[in-house]
Amino acid sequence: MKLPLDEVARLEGRTMLALALGLTSALIGWLCTLPLGIFALFLAIQSEAAILRLEDHDPLPEAVRGRLVRLQRCARWSLVLGVVGTVFFLVSLVRFLWLYLSSA
């Protein structure tokens, strides 16, 4: 039986990148800089889909299953932080446009 360890390793990288982008977007989303939260959401959704696909795989070893559970938790945090960052970005963008249009 071939284990999907290379796919799990790629999934770990994608999930950690989504978590970093989500955290960054939640921290600086109110600055109206970049919509990083959207990228975090995109990566987190891809990670969730890959985790679900791997869980449907034949019986996985306990170590791989533990890694998938940890990655699923990270992906869900990435989703939450991505949503928070996106909302902060949109609120900041609306506030900027409101100030810009009201000063004219």
Image: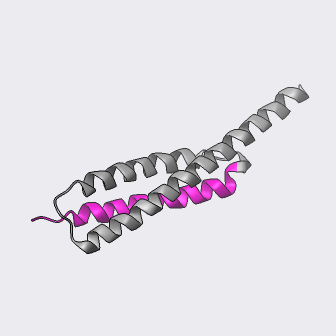
Was residue 8 drawn as part of the magenta stretch in this picture?
yes
Question: Relative to 97, is 75 above or below?
Answer: below
Q: Position of residue 74 (x, y in %)?
A: 46, 62
Scheme of colours in the image: one colour
Question: Relative to 90, is 52 above or below?
Answer: below
In front here: 60 or 3?
60
In the rendered view, does 44 fall on the left or right side of 56? Answer: right
- Magenta residues (range): 1-29
Extreme-left residue of the structure? 1
In front here: 94 or 100?
94
In front here: 30 or 103?
30
Was residue 2 drawn as part of the magenta stretch in this picture?
yes
- The number of numbered badges drawn on the structure is 0
Residue 3 appears in which quarter of the rendering? Answer: bottom left
In the rendered view, does 15 fall on the left or right side of 89? Answer: left
Q: Position of residue 60 (x, y in %)?
A: 21, 66
Position of the C terminus, as image quadrant, is top right
